[in-house]
Image (cartoon, rainbow, N blue to C red):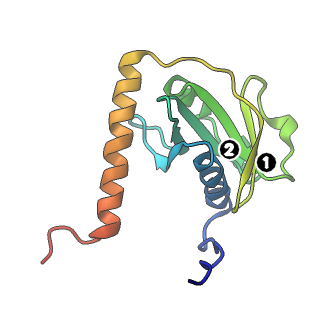
Amino acid sequence: MTDPAPFDPPALMPGQLLACGVCRHLRQHDFATLEEFVPDRGLRVDVMALGPRGEVWIIECKSSRADFTSDAKWQGYLDWSDRYFWAVDEDFPTDLLPEGTGLIIADAYDAEILRMGPETKLPAARRKVLTRKFARTAAQRLHLFRDPKPGTI
């Protein structure tokens, strides 16, 4: 049996490449991840991660200073996770990132958690809604991967 081909990330935007590395790293910690997840109307997070004990993490991937300073919505994400993180590359000026948030250094291939975001437990009702929406979104995306043109014969 031959070794599988090395991971070659597809042509993605810089923030999406960071998300790839973050998702790979979190899988090593038994987290399931979804990119570009919508927890509620008007919100779209770069990565939502569901941990083995039901914990919910949100990770926002910022590829540059301009990308970070143009994002005014991030505080609205805090109510939708148990922990919140920024994922940036090793050249990002991390002193820009707010205190009291997690920090992940990433590239397209892997990541490292440098600072855990503080834990703020989600209310049980919101956790239930998010977990259900996470599962349904994952199942729908998997189905579209398998059947990209549903309804056609």
Q: Quadrant of residue 113?
A: top right
Quadrant of the rendering where the N terminus is positioned = bottom right
> Where is mark 2, residue-wise?
70
Q: Secondary structure at mark 2?
A: loop
Residue 138 placement (x, y as % from top left): 37, 50
Residue at the image position 51 percent from the left and 47 percent from the top = 33
Q: Residue furthest bottom?
A: 2
Q: Secondary structure at mark 1?
A: helix
**Callout 1 environment at 10 Å: few (<14), some (14 to 19), or many (20+)?**
some
Q: Is residue 119 above or below residue 32?
A: above
Marks 2 & 1, CB-CB < 8 Å contact: no
Residue 139 placement (x, y as % from top left): 32, 52
* Gap in angstroms between the C-alphas marked 2 and 1: 9 Å
Q: Is residue 66 above or below residue 148?
A: above
Residue 1's disc number? none
**Callout 2 environment at 10 Å: few (<14), some (14 to 19), or many (20+)?**
few
Q: Residue furthest front?
A: 1
Q: Is residue 114 left or right of residue 44?
A: right
Residue 130 placement (x, y as % from top left): 39, 32
- In this rendering, which labeled residue sits more in front, label 2 or label 1? 1
Q: Is residue 98 above or below residue 3?
A: above
Q: How many marks can you see? A: 2
> Where is mark 1, residue-wise?
65
Q: Is residue 1 above or below residue 11?
A: below
Residue 93 placement (x, y as % from top left): 87, 44
As shown in the figure, which amino acid type bears the numbered disc 1?
A: Arg
As shown in the figure, which amino acid type bears the numbered disc 2?
A: Ser
First along the sequence among labels 2 and 1: 1
Q: Nearer the viewer, residue 43 or 148?
A: 148
Residue at the image position 14 percent from the left and 68 percent from the top = 151
